[in-house]
Amino acid sequence: MPQETKFVDKAILRKLYPLTNLLADDLDDLAKKTQVENLPAGSLLYTQGATDPHTIYLIAGSVELRDRDEQTSKIDADSATARRPLSPQKPRNATATALTDIAIIRIEDKLLELMINTSNLAQPVKPQTLDPNVIEERLFGRLYQDYLEDNMLLPSMPDIALRVRNAIDDQSRGVEDIAKIVQADPALTARLVQVANSPLYRGQGQINSCRNAITRLGLKQTRNLVYSFAMKQLFRSTLPALRQRMIQLWQHTTSVAAISAVLAQRTPGFEVDRGLLAGLIHDIGVLPIMAYAERYPQLVNDAEVFDNIVARLRGQIGALVLRRWEFDDELINVALEAEAWNRTGDPDKADYVDLVIMAQLHSYIGTSRMSKLPAIDQVPAFKKLALGKLSPRMSVQILEDSREDIAEVEKLLLG
């Protein structure tokens, strides 16, 4: 019976020198091409003077090396020496024989040399020598290729949001069915009841049940709010270097979403729930970038380069995420153009991109970021929204008067 082919675990490659210096996507590719060879004790791996075109690593068992002077040394797979290739010089300076049953991997010398040269990581790279263009090209190339192959590390729409959307799209299901799905998540139920009683939707009488909250809000609004409240669980990172960035991103996102919701409430032609959702998804493209950035430690450790790459890629990647989630074109455009400060769009009609642009600019008031952005009354979005009928000072005053409402929405989102 033929032996099943086994490919090496990427975690093993990551421990080997100089493979440890390769970028993570190169390690992925190499792991898919490299088979594990199992050999019995007494097997001859190579002889002294051989010029075979492979780099060989010992990953299990023990090997004896015997040089031209008949001096011997033993290498065990769990030793520090085994992290380097066996007799890397060519011609080989020793003969290698398995002392026990062993497992090895062989990598073609030309392939390894090509990967190291392409990655430009044969030696540790200092942050000041990091080529942001190369890293950006590789990161986006890997992201987009994985997207085409349906392997992209996209944030998944939370299950509860998918179930609610599918139920709402099913014409045979009503409020009772939606309420049953929502009630499976007590925290989500509580938030829907809270928002139904919030200044954004407050009607006559206090709402105390999930069913009544959905009735007051309506099915479409409920769907958008479920999306919004489920979004928080996506803003996480396992990498310590990115964890603080993720916290800051979520804080910025909730601030923009809260302001978007309040602006939508006070601007004719906009829906509160859709304004809230638009604010929450405007930076969704940053999440996959952070996930893939974990493969590039040099990038993560260079804040300026990382920020510049995020700024250039966030829109394109955000659009990919929202298309995969089957969001409509208007919200996809929010992700694409939320920082296109001079965007005109339809000069006669404001849209949710305009709303989020204004929400972002207002969120930066009083921060150092504001000095690098255009004045609020100089962006086309200001003139298109109802705020455009006012002075910048009065538009800020409207939000100042709505501070409690904004704070309450932020509290709902932050949980």
Image (cartoon, helix red, strand yellow):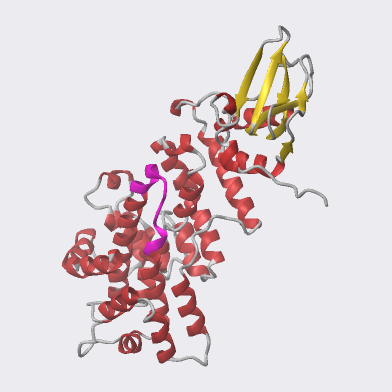
The x, y position of residue 126, in whole percent, is 46, 26
The x, y position of residue 82, in whole percent, is 59, 27
Q: Does residue 18 appear to the left or right of 246 in the view shown?
A: right
The x, y position of residue 226, in whole percent, is 39, 74
Q: Which secondary structure type mostly characterizes the magenta part of the structure?
A: helix
Let me know if residue 87 appears in the view: no
Badge count = 0
Magenta residues, start to end: 232-245
Q: Does residue 61 appear to the left or right of 51 in the view shown?
A: left
Task: Look at 63% across and 17% down and name the residue there.
Answer: 73
- Is residue 348 magenta-colored? no
Question: Furthest residue to the top?
Answer: 69
Q: Which image quarter is the C terminus in?
A: bottom left
Q: Nearer the viewer, residue 335 or 394?
A: 335
Tell me where residue 33 sits by quadrant: top right
Tell me where residue 269 sits by quadrant: bottom left
Q: Does residue 27 appear to the left or right of 225 in the view shown?
A: right
Tell me where residue 258 sits by quadrant: bottom left
The x, y position of residue 183, in whole percent, is 36, 81
Q: Is residue 320 above or below residue 304?
A: below
Task: Look at 77% across and 29% down and name the residue there.
Answer: 43
Q: Nearer the viewer, residue 91 or 268?
A: 91
Q: Does residue 314 appear to the left or right of 104 in the view shown?
A: left
